[in-house]
Image: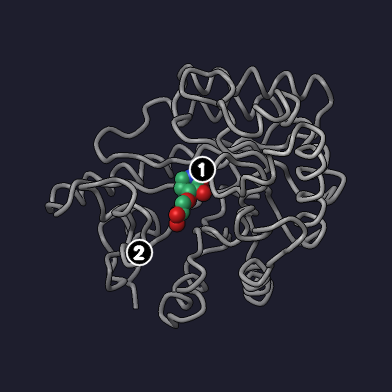
Amino acid sequence: MSGPLLGTAVHGRALREDAQYRRIVERDFDVVTPENAMKPAHVQPEPGRFDFAGADELVDFAEQTGKRVRGHTLVWHNQTPDWMTDGGPEAARAHLVAHIEAVVGRYRGRIWHWDVVNEALADDGTLRDSPWLRALGPDYLAIALTAAHAADPSAKLFLNDYNVEEVCTKSDAYYELARRLLADGVPLHGFGVQGHRISGEPPASLRENLERFGALGLEVAVTEADVRVPVPASREDVEVQASVYRRMLDDARAVEACTAFVVWGFSDRYSWIPETFEGFGAAHVMDEHFRAKPAYSAVFGEEDVA
Ligand code: XIL
């Protein structure tokens, strides 16, 4: 493959109801990932009651339009129903494996990358005190990866997290974790750095960081890039934002093991930022009217947006 494929997170309702949104996804991206539709709370809200409607729509759309899918996500501390983890270790293990078998098995052969475990570490590099850790101990990572591999041997299995763009305590801990899992023969194929940034300085050691995971034999990807700015954004803010996008993409392109550069949404019209980070917004490459911002040309080059 020559360089990372460009992708975007896809907002389920927008894909269904907003024809212009759908057209832009089709035109501009080679990879899609569901912003919410494959998360545990959506897919299996109650024990044994599955709802694959949103996930099916996304995978069908990808197949009809020739795009690859990053599955996101199987094991996380957010958007996960309590019943999965609160019935004691045996029940939690059974729920973990059954969930993965059902979801990964349903799309067997159709998913390029799976974010198997999302956000497993805390910023200090220790295992995050998540419901899964509390229920199962550190083994939950290997249990999840092994179950996912059995359910779809062709999917590339990723760990994915934020605040790991640079060489830092947290990414050092991922490097050690990945080495240990690989040494133990656990099926792990990739490391995803989310890339949620506050505009300003680009992550200085992104390239070096991605390189070292690549040297372990893993694929790497920037999986959720967005660059938030204080709102209302000034002209200068959006220029600096463009340079941060550009620098991250250049770093991704410079690393042979990097196979995807995925933005967490492309338009300020459908954005998780304003509701999550007070006082911030305008984080994406297009504005609310799908007009290209400087970041759009930074990512896609100068060609006209029709
Ligand atoms: C976010 C979605 O964008 C929101 O719509 C939802 O309310 C919460 O989750 N890291 C991740 C993503 O791995 O799954 C998160 O997505 C953003 C942070």
Mark yes or no: residue 42 visible: yes
Three-letter amino acid code at disc 1? Val
Q: Position of residue 215 (x, y in %)?
A: 65, 25
Quarter of the image where one finds residue 68: bottom right
Quarter of the image where one finds residue 137: top right
Q: Residue at the spot x=48%, y=76% of the render?
A: 22
Q: Position of residue 83 (x, y in %)?
A: 67, 46
Q: Is residue 197 left or right of residue 166?
A: left
- Residue 267's label in the rendered image is 2
Callout 2: CB less than 8 Å from ligand 1: no
Mark 2, Cα crowd under 10 Å, few <14 / some 14-19 / many 20+, is many
Circle 1 sits on which residue?
A: 222
**Foreground pick, 12 / 176:** 12
Give the spatial CA distance, label 1 vs label 2.
Answer: 18 Å
Mark 1, Cα crowd under 10 Å, few <14 / some 14-19 / many 20+, is many
Three-letter amino acid code at disc 2? Ser
The tag earlier along the polypeptide, 1 or 2, is 1
Q: Residue at the spot x=55%, y=49% of the render?
A: 79
Q: Quadrant of the C terminus?
A: bottom left
**Foreground pick, 24 / 137:** 137
- Residue 301's label in the rendered image is none
Which secondary structure, mark 2? loop
Q: Residue at the spot x=65%, y=42% of the render?
A: 75
